Image (cartoon, rainbow, N blue to C red):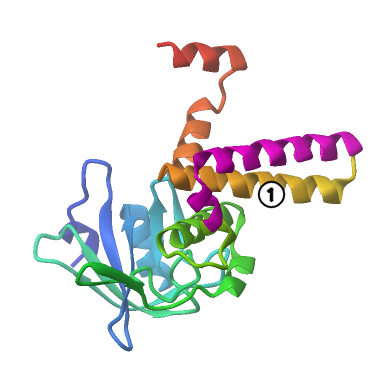
Amino acid sequence: MNLLDQLKFDKDGLLPCIAQDAENGEVLMLAYMNAESVQNTLKTGKVHYYSRSRAKQWMKGESSGNVQLVREIRYDCDGDTLLIKVEQKGSACHTGRRSCFFSRVDGNEINIDSEPDTATAAAYGEQDILDAVYHVIQDRRRNPSEKSYVHSLFTKGLDKILSKIGEEATETAVAGKGGITDEIVYEVADLFFHTLILLGYYDLPPERIYAELRRRFGMSGIEEKESRTK
């Protein structure tokens, strides 16, 4: 019996997949799969997903090393959801936590079960690290700490966030004029970081930016500007 024949993908060719720790039953994350990622998961024994933001298949841990080794695959009674029991290497969550479900609701209060493993971030790939930083920013916003620089910016409000972006943009321009590559890298990283804080303020995930860049790809500047007026 072919697994793909038992599955019902949605109109976009996707279905949700829950990853669960095979040893202790902890729910680690939820992501999406298409037929190709299901096939590659079966073929390699390592979980593959489909990224809706990047519009491409990816293997969990391909850049971070936090792979998920398949121990058991199940599907629900409707065939529209997968459950994969895995051996998780390292962290499953972008924030560096073991599970994405670290926020616990106790009555009217929200408590956090664990702190992120910041060392994990060093292993992320280019786009993954932007997503990881964004998730940490949102975590700092929702779970205030007096020691958090990010939370202090959210507390001071939008004008402060915008002024920091202006400041970092100016420093980036100065570094670009100076031509010292290390300084350019440092200032651009600062600018990216504070821009992610602005996205967090409006609850705009980086995938919205990726989607807009994909939309523009291959257009001339004139075509892109005209497309905004249509």
Task: Give the camera-side residue of 176 and 127.
Answer: 176
**In the image, is residue 92 part of the stretch drawn in magenta?**
no
Estimate how packed mark 1 is, as few (under 14), some (14 to 19) or many (20 or more) residues with alpha carbons within 10 Å: some
Left or right of 20 in this view: 77: left
Give the percent coordinates (x, y) of residue 147.
57, 68
Give the percent coordinates (x, y) of residue 203.
40, 45
Residue drawn 53% across the image and 67% down it: 146
Tag 1: residue type? Asp
Provide the major secondary structure of the magenta segment.
helix
Magenta-tinted stretch = 152-178
Task: Give the camera-side residue of 216 and 152.
Answer: 152
Left or right of 172 in this view: 123: left
Q: Which residue is mark 1?
A: 190
Location of the N terminus (image quadrant): bottom left
Give the percent coordinates (x, y) of residue 179.
90, 39
Residue drawn 52% across the image and 43% down it: 198
Task: Give the camera-side residue of 146 and 198.
Answer: 146
Left or right of 162 in this view: 111: left
Task: Give the camera-side residue of 82 and 148.
Answer: 148
Give the percent coordinates (x, y) of residue 199.
49, 43
Asked which secondary structure carries label 1, the reply is helix
Residue at the left extreme of this rendering: 77
Give above or below for 109 relative to 8. Answer: below
Location of the C terminus (image quadrant): top left
**In the image, is residue 170 part of the stretch drawn in magenta?**
yes
Residue at the bottom extreme of this rendering: 23
Residue 54 visible in image: no
Residue 8 visible in image: yes
Give above or below for 58 relative to 88. Answer: above
